Image: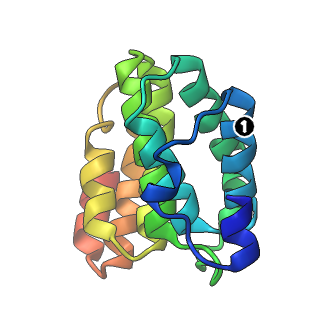
Amino acid sequence: VLTSLVNDTPLLSKDLVKFKGDHQHWWDAFELAVDNKAWATAVTALEALGKKKVETILWLQLAKRLSKRHALFMDESGIPFTDVDYLRLSRLYELCINAAKNANALDLVAALAHLRARCLEMGGHYSQSIALLQQFSQGKQAVPAKMSIARNHCRMGDLPASIRTLD
């Protein structure tokens, strides 16, 4: 990751074929990529990690480190930041969601799914965001999910659907 940042080139999967490292190495590399907004590199690193057999705690910590930074990637005004690749950020959340599902950490899955949906929304992929949020429109996640669904309908210009969702 450091080499890819210094050379200003994205990390490639072939660069990680022989990489071994302990949890701290993965955490540091991931944080370095995300903090430098090297989105392609961060995705490549997590996709490579997803192909390895690793302890669940590694993924849970990666999800925690990513979600703690979420406020740095967007504000509540709804105006996307120009230096954030929201589709790749969404992919990072998706990889963490998959690991949380494998660990049967369903509360974490729901929390990460909401963050992923917000990334999809900020990236202009409103229909995908709605589809993801509809999985959580019942039970204890219903209110925040429906509010986000309604906001996505508004962004799509579908005010009647937004009002129906809120009703």
- At 36% from the left and 21% from the top, the residue drawn is 102
Q: Is residue 113 visible?
A: no
- Residue behind mark 1: 25
On the rendered structure, is 61 left or right of 47? right
Mark 1 surroundings within 10 Å by alpha-carbon count, few (fewer than 14), some (14 through 19), many (20 or more): few
From the viewer's perspective, is residue 30 above or below residue 80?
A: above
- List x then y, in percent, for residue 144: 47, 43
On the rendered structure, is 140 left or right of 159? right
- List x then y, in percent, for residue 7: 70, 78
- List x then y, in percent, for residue 108: 50, 27
- List x then y, in percent, for residue 94: 40, 46
On the rendered structure, is 81 left or right of 99? right
- At 26% from the left and 76% from the top, the residue drawn is 158
Q: Secondary structure at mark 1?
A: helix
Q: What sort of colour scheme is used for the picture? A: rainbow
Q: How many marks?
A: 1
- At 42% from the left and 16% from the top, the residue drawn is 103
- At 67% from the left and 64% from the top, the residue drawn is 73
Q: Quadrant of residue 3?
A: bottom right
On the rendered structure, is 139 left or right of 85? left
Front-most of residues 136 and 157: 136
From the viewer's perspective, is residue 143 above or below residue 45?
A: above
Q: Quadrant of the N terminus?
A: bottom right
Front-most of residues 39 and 147: 39
Front-most of residues 124 and 52: 52
Q: Quadrant of residue 124?
A: bottom left
- Residue lying farthest to the front in this orientation: 18
Q: Is residue 153 visible?
A: yes
Q: Mark 1: which amino acid?
A: His
